Amino acid sequence: MSESATIRLTMAQALIRFLKNQYVERDGVDAPFFAGCFGIFGHGCVAGVGEALIENLDFPYYQVRNEQAAVHAATAYAKVKNRMQTFACISSIGPGATNMITGAATATINRLPVLLLPADIFARRNVAPVLQQIESAASQDFSANDCFKPVSKYWDRINRPDQLLTALPEALRVLTSPSETGAVTVALPQDVQTEGYDYPVAFFRKRVWHVARNRADRAALRQAAGMIRASKRPMIVAGGGVIYADATEALRSFVDATGIPVGETMAGKGSLRWDHPLNMGAVGATGTLAANRIAHDADLVIGIGTRYSDFTTASKTAWQNPDVQFININVTEFDAGKHHGLPVVGDALVTLEELAELLAGYCVDAGYRAKAQRLHDEWDAEVQRIYDLRLAPLPSQGELIGALNEVSGPDAIMVNAAGSMPGDLHKLWRTTHPKNFHMEYGNSCMGYEIAGGMGVKMAAPERDVYVIVGDGSYLMLSSELVTCVQEGVKLIVVLWDNHGFKSIGSLSRSLGLDGFGTRFIRRKEGVLVGDSAGDAVEPLQIDFAMNARSLGCHVIECRTYDDYVAALEAAKTTDRTTFISICNDRLVGVPGYESWWDVAVPEVSELAAVREARVNYEEMQARERYFLE
């Protein structure tokens, strides 16, 4: 067929045909980039993209119940696939589109690829304003989809069918870029979706996008090696980039050879197995005693694939050595330049391999290595102590984590996102493989859990997937339980019910605010709805088990710790999504282990508890650093 050959298609038909022929390749292995699409049809897409999907049944369509959930599922899928595969998400115009904005922010913050295809207003304008159109007196080229711009890594609107020819390659360039990836939004006016155009046949040929392993500048590598050799107490901060680059084995070899201890971020947890003697566990505001003590005195921090969030740095208080320096290994120049460190811009796998060659024969002082291993062992004993608590009448969150960790099996995947669980899981979860700990904490997005769990299970159908969700998050977005039942996607959903927002309740108490507004209770005039209200208020009686049962789940209700363990065992044998519920003590938490997180306290208050909290706040704030050296 000649290069000039064309085929007449609608814009929507061309879109789907293009997407299903996009592949990615890294290390010689290629696969389709899109596993299909999630979506809900409305008047803005049913006759355009909807018709195109009927003509392309080899591009699977999955009906979801909430557009935000669709984006979460796609994001979670991409995370499990190390960003080498994802989904497209379609929606109608108006509220269907704007429902996806929170999901877009979550994907972009976490640097995970997802393609958003919201329908848009009529490009030809003559019938405006159409249903669900936001009007502007300043411009006719404006719609609700402009709201996606701040949370998208690439944004476009297709006002003519031929614009696909330039827009889609740009969208794929960003989606497949290790450094630029995130949410990509291509808005589709509903009339243009149905317009025909003579597209070049060559546009639909298989295209393979190579995901490069960019190598770092050699001079920067030599400088990094020199800084490591000169250091006395170096540490590694392993971020999500280690896992996305498939660099976990390279990291283990590097650590074994050099003896440098490792602290893990939320996204980087699983970079080393929990039982590696130089894995100090979580670092920062949700860190372990081992990692935070190593960090406190470190004179060199080697950040690998981390963006140094405030949780990782404990709001810039984690590293107190006045002479501390930073080496930042990252595919993204922006992140590599943080903390005025030495930027080593490159892929984590090849950078670690080349740095190891330059450090041949180097190892930290034997006493420092022994100290790190001792701290690892002491932390392991502390985790077991918390696992073995048997509090009455309600179990603690730490006990529930321990039971799930021990029962779930080494090949399983645990999914969580928001509330008090991420911090406790970051400290306590014993991670057995790089995907064992699936935490969305870049956006800490309540409602991610069940939808994300669905995406995880679709990406790894051979593994058991355990979704931990609090009662607050469940009430926000549990709708994809129905999708799981419909599609035969089995999750084990574990709901921990503490009658409110446990995380913010604890934070509120630490700020002198008595847990105000964080309990699920009936309003009572004249009673402050905080913790001091005690039994003067009536908790809401919410039957989560009945709700899950009505959505088609197999349900197991638990009252005791032993019930809970038995339920986890039983859930392994069920044939569909299984929902386990148990109440836990909202007032029992896991210690902070010499860490801090900056949440500002009012400078002026009539409340004595707030004034006391302010004194502590100012003392800790004084420890924050700029790392200018």
Image (tube, helix red, strand yellow):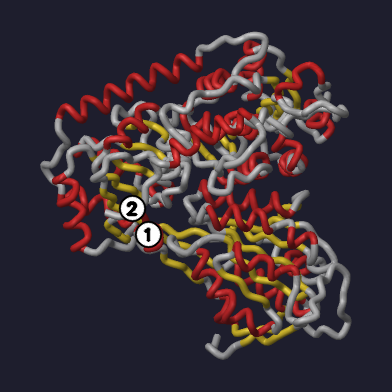
Q: Are marks 2 and 1 in contact (CB under 8 Å)?
A: yes
Whether residue 467 is visible here, answered yes or no, is no
Q: Nearer the viewer, residue 191 or 524?
A: 524
- Location of residue 392 (image quadrant): top right
Q: Nearer the viewer, residue 53 or 178?
A: 178
Vertical position of residue 454 compared to residue 569: above or below: below
* Mark-to-mark CA distance, 2 and 1: 7 Å
- In the rendered image, residue 432, in percent from the top left (x then y), is placed at 43, 31
- In the rendered image, residue 597, in percent from the top left (x then y), is placed at 49, 39
Is 361 displayed left or right of 259 in the figure? left
Residue at the left extreme, as displayed: 361
Lower sequence index among marks 2 and 1: 1
Q: Amino acid at mark 2?
A: Ala
Q: Residues within 10 Å of mark 2 (few under 14, many from 20)?
A: many
- Which residue does the image show at 30% across and 59% down from the upper left? 343
User: Secondary structure under badge 1?
Assistant: loop
- In the rendered image, residue 1, in percent from the top left (x then y), is placed at 55, 85
User: Secondary structure under badge 2?
Assistant: helix
Is 425 displayed left or right of 11 in the figure? left
The quadrant of the image that shows the C terminus is bottom left
Q: Which residue is mark 2?
A: 348
Whether residue 43 is visible here, answered yes or no, is yes
Q: Amino acid at mark 1?
A: Val
Q: Nearer the viewer, residue 180 or 427?
A: 427
The number of discs equals 2
Q: Which mark is residue 331?
A: 1
- Which residue does the image show at 50% across and 17% down from the upper left? 387
